[in-house]
Amino acid sequence: MKIDKYEFPDELLYDKEHNWVRLEGDVATIGMTDFGQDLAGEIVYAEVPRVGREITQGDPFMSLESGKWVGRVKAIVTGKISEANEEIEWESTVINEDPYGMGWFAKVALNGDPLGLLKATDPEFAAFIAAEREKYGK
Amino acid sequence: MKLYRLETVSWSDSQLLYHAQPRLDREGLNLLSPGSPYVCIGYFQDVAQEVEVDLCRQQGIPIFRREVGGGAVFLDGEQLFYQLVIHRDNPLVPHGWEAFYRRFLQAPIAAYRALGIPAEYRPVNDIVANGRKISGNGAAEIGDYYVLVGNLIVDFDYEMMARVLRVPDEKFRDKVYKTLQDNLSTIRRELGYLPPRQKLWDLLAAKFAEVLGRLPIETTVDADWRAEVDALAADMLSDEWLFSKERRPAGRKVTIRAGVQVEQRMHKAPGGLIRALVERQDGRIASLSFSGDFFLYPAHKLADLEAALTGVGLAEVEPTVARFYAEHDIQSPGVTPADFARVLS
């Protein structure tokens, strides 16, 4: 579904750090939302997490650079990185151009169910995005 | 938060001190300057692609990778650094990094203006005066802290900056040098003289006080801070840290200021390799030179094609080349106007 100009695919789940996750059994594919990439601006560098690394929901696990700002990305799930999208290290703007497709960050072997995630259709999610747009003037 | 007026420190302290503060859970505004020159690269940069490492080592110029974004820069004692380390939950921190830059860069802008230099904010993180960059700035999240680093540029060694950057050839280096001269200014150039150093430090402190409120002043580095700096030095001054990022080479691009870049671009067309040395200003081609191993007839028209593309925006490259081909009956086997658009895209 679309919220204002931002796309949020119905089949994904979202956190309040502008990340998405696609759950397929015990494997989660994770990335940044359309709103998140717009907030970041043109992403010039991305650091891919190494395969095998344990990540914890809510803790930073990788870095991005846009506008000479190096920012940390918080994990949307807990588990072990099983695959990393190395293409985003070479062509980081793909995160801006295709955040739900080519711009995915990593696949994670889940360790427990992620907590507190929302669907795009949840009224709470729409309210969150509206508040974020107000906060950041988007 | 405290104001640390440290003035001249060692080159390594000029970087390690602000990296240590978030790790000590400590806010601060540091005003300091390095005691000797060095080269500093952005967190994500590949030092081997960005810096003439051998030259720096021969000349005894250290190279440091910071955790802050941006590009490779030559730093020395003619630049007065401000380093703001502020907790993300501090009520002074606005939402969004552009607002962050805009708020805290008010202080150096006001300092420049108090000197009579018409400085203004240029998104995202530049300060310009009379159309030229006059301060470099970068930021990062380190732990729960936001860090802003930047400088007042009293004087600048343009030649050394152009020498330490790794470039494909001397023609490119010459272009970088000239573009730096045209687009980067200093207090000395703007005023025609050098104001007393103490006056500049006092101005910076006073203008930051207008943004942050009055802060208690410290002039030394305490034992805890020194211990954290020493611990960080073991990692951050190592070659392992310096060479920790390796990136795939893809041409060469040097950003002079926001909106101004010098680039070398390459594209392998079916008819041969096209190389372009291009200077861009705000999305338009400011100057351009083609080389490579492709054929274009009549050959003397290549300079005219470069002239025809000067001032042109990216979207207009292909139609401009197509029009030029038609008007001048250009033949270039295996190279089409789309290939020129590709090399400049």
Image (spheres, coloured by chain):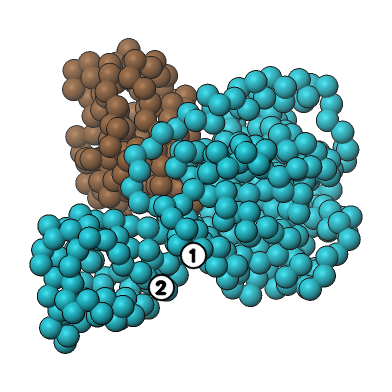
Chain colours: A brown, B cyan
Q: Residues within 10 Å of mark 2 (few under 14, many from 20)?
A: some
Q: Is residue B130 left or right of residue A4?
A: right
* Residue type pointed to by label 1: Lys
Label pair 1/2, CB-CB below 8 angstroms: yes
Q: Which mark is residue B175?
A: 1
Q: Which badge, 1 or 2, comes first in the chain's sequence? A: 1
Q: Quadrant of the C terminus of chain A?
A: bottom left
What separation in Å lies between label 1 and label 2 (alpha carbons)? 10 Å
Name the residue nearer the viewer: B59 or B45.
Answer: B59
Q: Which residue is mark 2?
A: B287
Question: Would you say residue A20 is visible in this rendering?
Answer: no
Name the residue nearer the viewer: A30 or B254.
Answer: B254
Quarter where residue A123 is shown: top left
Quarter where residue B85 is shown: top right
Q: Is residue A41 left or right of residue B292?
A: right
Q: Is residue B110 above or below residue B22?
A: below
* Residue type pointed to by label 2: Ser
Question: Would you say residue B186 is visible in this rendering?
Answer: yes
**Residue B177 picture location, percent across and down:** 55, 63
**Residue A88 picture location, percent across and down:** 31, 38
> The disc numbered 1 marks a residue on which chain?
B
Q: Which element type, helix, strand or loop, lies under badge 2?
A: strand
**Residue B96 picture location, percent across and down:** 52, 49
Residue occupying the point 33% across, 47% down: B250
